[in-house]
Structures are given as C-alpha cells and as structure tokens.
Image (cartoon, grey):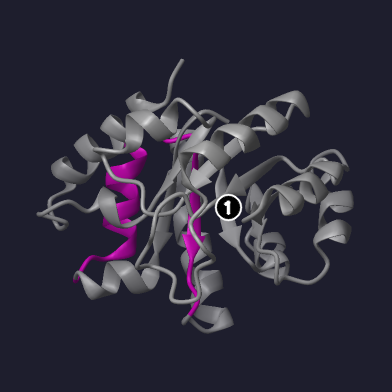
Amino acid sequence: MRGLYAICDVDTLRAHGVEVLPFAEAVLAARPCAMQLRAKTLSDSECLALLHALGAPCRAARVPLICNDRLDLARLAACDGVHLGQEDLGARDAVSVGDAPGSLRVGISTHTLDQLERALAMSPAYVAFGPVFSTRTKVDASPTVGLEALSLANDRARAAGTPLVAIGGITLETAPAVGARASALAVISDLLGSTPRDPATVTARASAFRRAVAS
C-alpha cells in the first residue's frame, strides 16, 4: 500500500453538495492505493447499497474498497477490507479472520505509539496513525501527533513490515512532509478543493496527493 488512501466521507461530501459516486469515480481516475467509505450517519441498508455501488468502479480501477467500522457490511458487500478504530470491538478477531486466504484485509486506527505497538502485534494489513494535524471531519478526534511522532511510528511500522497510513488534517501543502514519513496519505476534505463538484479538479488533487508520497 503506497500513495493516496482516499476516504469518501458521506457527511463531508453532503456538506459540500457533492454526490458520492461521481466523486469516487473522479478520485479513482488518479489511481489511489485504496478507497474507504465512511458513512457514519447512513442506515445499514443505505451503507450496504453504497458499498455495492462503489464495488464495480473500484474493481475496474483495481483499487481496494475498504469499509469503515463495519465488518459485517464489509463481508456482505464483498469489500477488500475493513478499517477498525480503537473503539471498535473484535479487532483481534477481525485480524485473525484477515489472515485466512481470500478474506478481508483489516486496517487499524492508532493514535499513540503504545496503540501502534499493540496493533502491529496483530499483524494487520496496515495501520493508520494520527491525527497528524487538527481535523474538522471528526468531532471526537484524538490529540494531534505531529510529524516527529509520525516519523517514529513509521519506523516501527516499517520494522514490522506493515504499511503506515498517515491521517488527519493533511493538505496539499503539508503532503510532501507527511509523505516522507508514511507509506500512504489518508485524505478527506482536501481532495475537494475550491471547486468540489468539478471531477477534473478532484482528479488533479488526488493525483497530486499520490505523487507526494516519497518513493
């Protein structure tokens, strides 16, 4: 996993008057390394329908589709992976499931180096670390970790052979510094830019984030 880890956050997109599927297709044109659906306020049936709708364009682009939080919906929608937060129950069970051939890959959010070490011990597909900077897309966000802690976390993840995804308040301006300290950049708001309904702009911004990750 290397490059842009794009997050389609339904609430953020709705706040900007942006439809999920056209936005996702514009991002997929930039070939991100993964696409996550975050749908905190949708019903189970709405989220499942949206995952099914995203599946075809993600498969066509050969981009893994990740479901946020919901292991059950990820399985029903035949997603490639599920992303679990520290508050989600059953993370260890999910990771053991992820070890089986052909099953879901599991990513785990971490906010401290201690949490990171515990997550790495589970041998997940990847770990997320942050928020690197302050973010407005999560009202209950943990304290920011900053670039120094991100560097330490990335060193530990690399030693464990696990990709690290930096997340939280990452912009095009900060992307090069963050990209030098992570395998991938998780981006939500700054994919939109000043003209969020323009697919070409979204694709261009997504491409710029992908290029910002150090080779």
Looking at the picture, tell me which residue is in the foreground, 120 or 148.
Answer: 148
Question: What residue is rendered at 45% in x and 25% in y?
Answer: 180
- Residue 209 located left or right of residue 132: left
- Residue 58 located left or right of residue 19: right
In the rendered image, the vertical position of residue 113 relative to residue 205, given as above or below: below
Question: What residue is rendered at 76% in x and 51% in y?
Answer: 114
Q: Position of residue 74 (x, y in %)?
A: 66, 61
Q: Is residue 78 visible?
A: no
The magenta stretch spans residue 18? yes
Quadrant of residue 73 within the rendered picture: bottom right
Categorize mark 1 by other alpha carbons within 10 Å: few (<14), some (14-19), many (20+). Answer: many
Q: Is residue 61 visible?
A: yes
Looking at the picture, tell me which residue is in the foreground, 37 or 162.
Answer: 162
Looking at the picture, tell me which residue is in the foreground, 124 or 202.
Answer: 124
The residue under label 1 is 66
Query: Which span is picked out in magenta?
Result: 17-40
Query: The residue under label 1 is which amino acid type?
Result: Ile
Question: What residue is rendered at 72% in x and 70% in y?
Answer: 88
Q: Give SS at disc 1.
A: strand
In the rendered image, the vertical position of residue 25 relative to residue 30, given as above or below: below
Q: Position of residue 126 (x, y in %)?
A: 67, 41
- Residue 88 located left or right of residue 101: left
